[in-house]
Image: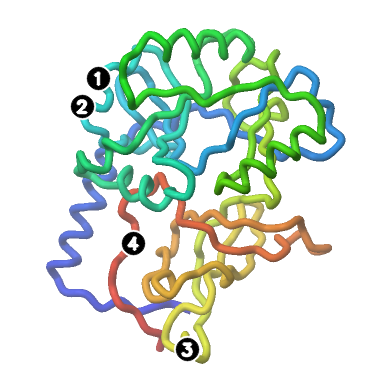
Amino acid sequence: MKIPVRQGCLRVGLMMLMCLLVAVARASEPPLQLARVYQAGMDLQGYWVSEKLDGVRAYWDGQQLLSRGGNIIAAPGWFLRDFPAQPLDGELWMGRGRFAQVSAAVRRLQPKAQEWRQIRFMVFDLPASGVPFSERVKRMRELVGKTSSYHLALVEQRPATDHGALLARLDRVLAVGGEGLMLHHGESIYTAGRTATLLKVKTSQDAEATVVDYSEGKGKYQGQVGALVVETGDGRRFKLGSGLSDNDRADPPPVGSTVTYKFFGLTANGLPRFASFLRIRNDQPPARSRNVSQFD
């Protein structure tokens, strides 16, 4: 079901110009390492544990900041002044519970100084070093220790011990508004793609899907979006209604955009159980149409 769009010629022109600017300000996708999900019973020997920050993933290639999708992030020059020439992998972060704010700041084509003064680039890996992660931890500490920049900081890494201690730390992080934990094997070399040497530890899982359609709302949401119809990478379709705010329903993520959702395991049919919308993927700058829509 399609949502007709009401907008004037000026708005169309502005949107076309914005899309052109976004297309120009794009590099190739950085070769990021991606995590798998931790399962109870896994051997934790040799792993390092850190907090999973709820910020925007970013890759410093030695000259510019890139988003996960390869968009050039328009950070102020003074923010990047003391960054090293070597690549860094990390998270642009304002603090726990402030994802929406940092995402909005990062997606702007023209950066706002008052927003970027509150952001730090939290480094958690050295992609091009070619040494095991335990050695990369030492090098990151030395690298960040040499800079006087407030905006370049290090994600704290500690040796993991056992499952009980891991869950206890997870509870402490969640209690103060954190998102979860990350496990990184000390002997692993940084490689692009998903790997079992990098694990995320959360009470729920999350994944991404592409918006392909909408279903109409009922009752108080009549004339608005009731749910997003999304498709996973393996072609499975399902509806995402839970987690949508009133603003999301009135101004939904556009068809073709990538959204993140959380879920609790899979059903017998292989679909996400209790799937709930979290956010539009944060490396897709200004994608929303910002217009009032209604169903036929």
Q: Which residue is mark 3?
A: 220
Marks 1 and 3, the one that precedes in the sequence: 1
At mark 1, the secondary structure is loop
- Residue at the location (81% across, 34% down)? 163
For the view shown, which residue lies furthest in the right direction? 41
Marks 2 and 3, the one that precedes in the sequence: 2
Marks 2 and 4, the one that precedes in the sequence: 2
At mark 2, the secondary structure is helix
Which three-letter amino acid code belongs to the residue tagged 4?
A: Arg
Residue 81's tag is 1
**Where does residue 226 sit, x and y in percent of width and height?**
52, 79
Give the Cα separation between the discs numbered 2 and 4: 27 Å
At mark 4, the secondary structure is loop
Quadrant in the picture for residue 78: top left
Q: Which residue is mark 2?
A: 77
**Where does residue 111 sit, x and y in percent of width and height?**
22, 41
- Residue at the location (34% across, 13% down)? 147
Contact, CB < 8 Å: mark 2 with mark 1?
Answer: yes
Contact, CB < 8 Å: mark 2 with mark 4?
Answer: no
